[in-house]
Amino acid sequence: MQAAPPSQPAPGRLPSGLRVYAIGDVHGRDDLLARLHAQIAADWRAAPATQAAIIHLGDFVDRGPDSAGVLDRVAGPPPIPGATAITLRGNHEAMMLDAVAPGASRQALALWLMNGGLATQRCYPQGVPERHLALMRGMKLTWEAGDYLFVHAGIDPRQPLEAQQESSLLWIREPFLSWTGPLPRVVVHGHTPAQLPQVRANRIGIDTGAVAGGPLTCLVLQDAGLRFLSAS
């Protein structure tokens, strides 16, 4: 079976036979993630490709009601059996790890709590289990496929890829968002919410504010095309 034609041309290309499903910021909305995973599974069954990769772009925790459920879900089997599964770290995972580390400073704890960590803390009345800490510690900062770089926040467009700082990958907004020149890769990112996915020549932003009443968005890339799935 062949995949359905993409809804629009993409700014980059993937290797032939690979389909990528990239999921934006979840922020504790395990209900939406469950629905989106079900859509991904149905999409694949309807028109499988040769190989699938499912990548979550970080910010699994904070603000929403079930960060623990989200981490359990992404740690489990992917919605497509045999798919490559990638979990990237977001700035909220970084804040949480800093806040719950042994000997963490009051400043680290305060920063996390005032940025949505209180909702996450309620998920863990007995403390954060080691399996979730290990999952977050093991998350990558970037992943590449074809013409694309997948990252939580973006990159510093003034620096080559090999010189990117972790702080930029997790936190950057400007000058990345307004950069109109070429980048080393087409950057697929979350972190900065918008009402609709942002498709530009040099980047695709897919944080559509799921925790604030927007949908949870999945970008589907294959060959030189793209389309979207969403759960609300």
Image (tube, grey):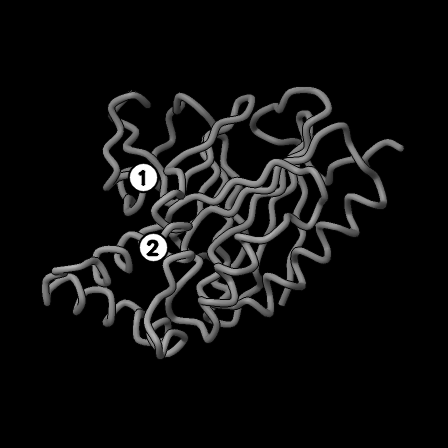
| Left or right of 117 in this view: 145 | right
Q: How many marks?
A: 2
**Element under label 1?**
helix
Callout 1: 10 Å neighbours few (<14), some, many (20+)? many
137 and 115: which one is in front?
137
137 vs 200, nearest the viewer: 137
User: Which of pointers 2 and 1 lies earlier in the amino acid sequence?
Assistant: 2
Residue under the point 27% across and 56% down = 97
**Above-or-below relation of 168 to 160:** below
Q: Position of residue 47 (x, y in %)?
A: 83, 39
x then y, percent, for residue 198 = 50, 46
Nearest to the observer: residue 64 or residue 105: 105
Q: For the N terminus, give its image quadrant.
A: top right
Q: Are marks 2 and 1 in contact (CB under 8 Å)?
A: no
Q: From the viewer's perspective, is residue 151 above or below residue 133?
A: above
Which of the labelled discs sits on residue 17, or is there none? Answer: none
The residue to which callout 1 is attached is 169
- Spot occupied by residue 70 in the image (x, y as percentages of width and height): 51, 62
Disc 2 target residue: 93
Residue at 71% x, 50% y: name it: 40
In the rendered structure, which amino acid carries the disc numbered 2? Answer: Glu
Q: Amino acid at mark 1?
A: Leu
SS under mark 2: helix
Relative side of 136 to 213, left or right: left
Please report the residue visible at 39 percent of the width from the left and 24 percent of the height from the top: 183
Q: Nearer the viewer, mark 2 or mark 1?
A: 2
